[in-house]
Image: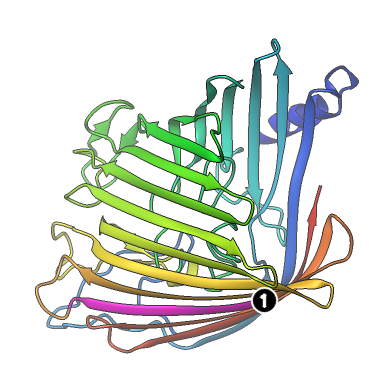
Amino acid sequence: MKKSLLCAAVALACSPAFAADVQLFGFFDQGIAFLNENLAAGMGGPNSATQQHFADGATKVGMQGRKNQVSLGTGNVSTWGIKLTEQLNDDVSVGIHLENGYLPDSGEFYMDNVLFERESSIAINSKTYGQIKFGRMPAMLTGSGTTGIFNSRVNPFGAGWGNMTGGWKFVGTLATARHNNMINYKSPTFNGVTFHAQTSFGDDYTNKTTGKTGEEGSSKVNHYSALGVTVQGDKYFLAAGVDYLKMGSVQGAVTDDSIKAIIGGHYDFGSFKGYATVQYMDNIQYIGGYSTKEFAVVKNKGDTTKGFDAWAVAVGADTKVGGGTAKFSVGYAQAENQNLDDNKDLVRMNVGVGYIYPLSKRTSIYGIGGYFWEDADYNEDKIYASEVIVGLMHRF
């Protein structure tokens, strides 16, 4: 089925009848990664992190053990997709955006059983009234795709590269990164100011533990909403947003609703650009992403689950050097695990450096290095991890 859909999509993009309106696009990133880490039990990702509980009589979470690894790796997720646009009149057009993530070293889908997991949306665009989108798409408070507003304009590494390098997500969170059944609105731009709004009706859901089910649009499933604003000037960019995850009675992973707020941007000083983000997180299910992803620990298996209360800050800069761009970023966060009465504090930081050199308008080589450190009262030991990735990127 997937192969048939894929062939049909490519055939559509290549058809002469649609050549003026259809664009096949993509991004390929492949490199060699050197990874050194000793994470707490349950950490890791993007999809392998699990919530931990204390073993009988224990008051600390154990460690996974030191890992040294050399493998094919990437700084960013590789993608391909199709864009279709039809102009209905001088003011209104319709657009379709279909985008898939994949693993370049194996050719596998980034997410099992989802063909267009990065985005699958249809948009009505009006120069007068703005844009409204429907479908699956990135949450506003991310750096991803067409609807995330906290991208490379707020940090030289965007949300972050690799497993722990730069960005803001490794000290903050990418919880609620994408949603199905989403509606997204973006206003026309007035003097550089654009307003953004999102809401999701949730998904049909079955709790594997209890067997209970919830239907899309009901109070049994999670509902996501967000509001934001972006301001673009000649030398600066500013973004601010807040989102709210209403926990469903069946699907809710934590007992109370979650709230996040982020403000970030950059200023061009001429010889370099300076970047900064500040985050506030209330009852977030997990903090971090990829290797730094960590769920809020509970005392006993099956305990009622709350999340982290946290704040984080990241600053960075980039500048032109030797025909390429040098990047630097450092992030810091403090959090409290709301499941614990004592020994519940967490402090973490990450550092990222990188250099990108363009070989052409579409192809670049890069090298990045990242360092991550965490001290959590409830973990058996401090966490130290590092990575180096050297790779090649191509856009089409």
Of helix, strand and loop, which one carries label 1? strand
With 303 as the anchor, is 2 left or right in this view?
right
Q: Is residue 344 above or below residue 339?
A: below
x, y percentage for residue 282? 24, 57
Image point 41% across, 34% down: which residue?
A: 198
Of 102 and 387, which appears nearest the observer? 387
Residue drawn at x 55%, y 33% is: 189
Q: Would residue 45 be found to the left or right of residue 335 on screen?
A: right
- Here the colouring is rainbow
Q: Mark 1 points at which residue?
A: 354
> Crowding near pointer 1: few (<14 within 10 Å), some, many (20+)?
many
Q: Nearer the viewer, residue 208 or 281?
A: 281
- Residue closest to the eye, 47 or 287: 287
Where residue 146 appears, x then y in whole percent? 59, 40
| Residue 348 on image: x %, y % | 37, 78
For residue 185, above or below residue 337: above
Kindly identify the amino acid type of the residue bearing the numbered disc 1. Gly
- Mark yes or no: residue 151 visible: no
Q: In which quarter of the image is residue 322?
A: bottom right
Answer left or right for 100 relative to 10: left
Residue segment shown in magenta: 344-354
Quarter containing the N terminus: top right
| Magenta-drawn stretch contains 226 | no
